[in-house]
Image: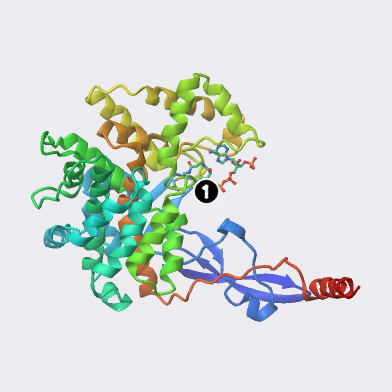
């Protein structure tokens, strides 16, 4: 719960202003500046929100100094051991893990909503060959509003289970269809007898000439990856979802915006960029050269999958993924030379003063792509996998935002452009010149 233990006093132009201090349930402290402009005429300036808490939230807790991540109070380490992705989705959206009946009802809803409207299926035929699946996905999700009724805010929020199940289920179908289309194979429809992750793998890899053998171990790994990506509090795409949703846009359009934000290489697109980087390093053979390039401030090259705005220690998701990656590859006797490159990059970086001083560690994206490769997922689908997994988080934040007293997100700015005096002067000069 939020406590208000007092005030801080700010002195502005000789005047003392009292600003309330708020403390979150895990002890995070903030100064509430909501009335600052009204009382003093000043705003705060914080480009890229380096130091701004944009909202109160009960969904996810991250301690970037200690490397802690909890969904609704439950550590991710426990969730990956004891739960399935669908249960975590329910947890994020509703605040509690489902009981047996709730789980069954939610699974039934997921199944009932797993088919894509047949007319939407034809959309896939008209994207150019080679279009990135993330671009296809954001477009298709936006189009959902045209195919499914009751997209007004109240209907969607009132029946949050249906909105949530439809998105989580249909987007999985869309993602697998997009892949099948891209390789020129017939699409595979979802099956009611399969779990969420098994269904996805089947839709991706089953074919009329070669039935897909569902391996429980592959399903387990996908489940872990999806749980670890399910939410991460106010990251860039969730902030996009909350900002755009605050204009009372329908949930589909809002999620589509989240997907667009996620596609960037500094955010979810990093999982694909890591593999591209590792392949480049492997081809060159000189790991140190790339480490030096990343350290060179005149060179735009960065170590993809390294660094994080919040984590100043090892990303707890990366720690789990690294462990699972090593174990899974060993168990299936799959040797990926890019794993050796990744290990070497990590080893050198973690002992280099540049990375140590800046607290740069592997993040969630560093080992993820290697696991996806081992599951047979193509590289251009990596960020789509991230998007599928992040859906429950976006929906939970949308629900929390709509349910609260959120006003439209509308920051201020400090204008540094031309003044009226500047332009009047220029106009006067121009007038004189034209007259002559
Ligand atoms: N390689 C080399 N130097 C780096 C890196 C990196 N990956 N990340 C940060 N730095 C340096 C940066 O140059 C700066 O140095 P200096 O203090 O000398 O100017 C310092 O570390 C602080 O970096 P920053 O850019 O101010 O940090 P940020 O919080 O604005 O950016 C980040 C965070 C994740 C965008 C950044 O670390 C980065 O670009 N990493 C690579 C891309 C990546 O892996 N993204 C996935 C993020 S985690 C999953 C997700 O969000 O989807």
Quarter of the N terminus within the rendering: bottom left
Q: Which residue, as the protein is rendered here, is positioned at the far top?
A: 285
Quarter of the C terminus within the rendering: bottom right
Q: Is residue 288 left or right of residue 109?
A: right
Residue 412: x percent and y percent? 61, 71
Mark 1 closeness class: few <14, some 14–19, many ≥20 residues within 10 Å: few
Between residue 120 and residue 211, name the one nearer to us: 120
Residue at left offset 39%, top offset 72%: 249
Count how many numbered circles sit on residues in the image: 1
Between residue 426 and residue 8, name the one nearer to us: 426
Q: Which residue, as the protein is rendered here, is positioned at the far right?
A: 436
Residue at left offset 30%, top offset 21%: 335
Residue 72 appears in the figure: no
Q: Is the C-beta of the residue carrying label 1 under 8 Å from the nearest atom of ligand 1? A: yes
In this view, 219 is above or below 17: above
Between residue 351 and residue 152, name the one nearer to us: 152
Q: Which residue, as the protein is rendered here, is positioned at the far bottom?
A: 38
Q: In what quadrant does ligand 1 lie? A: top right
In this view, 15 is above or below 335: below
Residue 131: x percent and y percent? 37, 46
The residue that mark 1 highlights is 309
Residue 107: x percent and y percent? 14, 57
Q: Quadrant of residue 112?
A: bottom left
In this view, 255 is above or below 282: below
Callout 1: helix, strand or loop? loop
Residue 200: x percent and y percent? 20, 46
Residue 271 appears in the figure: yes
Q: Is residue 421 left or right of residue 216?
A: right
Q: Which residue, as the protein is rendered here, is positioned at the far front?
A: 436
């Amino acid at each position: 719960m939020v406590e208000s233990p007092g005030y801080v006093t700010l002195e502005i132009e000789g005047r003392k202003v009292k600003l309330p201090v708020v403390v979150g349930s895990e002890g995070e402290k903030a100064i509430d500046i909501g009335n600052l402009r009204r009382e003093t005429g000043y705003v705060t300036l914080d480009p890229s929100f380096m130091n701004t808490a944009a909202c109160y939230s009960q969904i996810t807790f991250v301690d970037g100094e200690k490397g802690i991540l909890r969904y609704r109070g439950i550590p991710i380490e426990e969730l990956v051991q004891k739960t399935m992705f669908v249960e975590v989705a329910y947890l994020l959206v509703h605040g509690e893990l489902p009981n047996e009946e709730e789980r069954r009802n939610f699974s039934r809803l997921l199944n009932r909503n797993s088919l894509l409207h047949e007319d939407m299926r034809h959309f896939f035929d008209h994207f150019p060959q080679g279009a990135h699946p993330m671009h296809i996905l954001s477009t298709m999700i936006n189009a959902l509003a045209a195919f499914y009724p009751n997209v007004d805010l109240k209907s969607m929020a009132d029946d949050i289970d249906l909105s949530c199940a439809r998105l989580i289920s249909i987007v999985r179908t869309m993602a697998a269809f997009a892949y099948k289309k891209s390789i020129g194979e017939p699409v595979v429809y979802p099956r009611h007898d399969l779990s969420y992750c098994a269904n996805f793998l089947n839709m991706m890899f089953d074919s009329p000439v070669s039935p897909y053998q569902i391996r429980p171990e592959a399903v387990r790994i996908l489940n872990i990856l999806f749980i670890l990506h399910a939410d991460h509090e106010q990251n860039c795409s969730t902030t996009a979802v909350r900002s755009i949703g605050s204009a009372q846009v329908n949930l589909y359009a809002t999620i589509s915006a989240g997907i667009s934000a996620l596609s960037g290489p500094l955010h979810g697109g990093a999982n694909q960029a890591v593999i591209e980087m590792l392949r480049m390093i492997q081809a060159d053979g000189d790991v140190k050269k790339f480490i030096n390039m990343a350290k060179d401030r005149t060179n735009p090259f960065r170590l993809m999958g390294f660094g994080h705005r919040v984590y100043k220690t090892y990303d707890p998701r990366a720690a789990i993924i690294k462990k699972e990656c090593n174990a899974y590859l060993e168990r299936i006797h799959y040797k990926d030379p890019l794993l050796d490159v990744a290990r070497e990059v990590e080893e050198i970086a973690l002992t280099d003063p540049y990375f140590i001083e800046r607290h740069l560690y592997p993040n969630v994206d560093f080992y993820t792509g290697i696991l996806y490769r081992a599951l047979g997922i193509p590289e251009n689908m990596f960020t789509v996998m991230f998007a599928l997994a992040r859906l429950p988080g976006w929906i939970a934040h949308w629900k929390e935002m709509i349910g609260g007293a959120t006003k439209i997100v509308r920051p201020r700015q400090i204008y540094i452009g031309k003044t009226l005096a500047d332009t009047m002067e220029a106009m006067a000069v121009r007038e004189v010149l034209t007259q002559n």
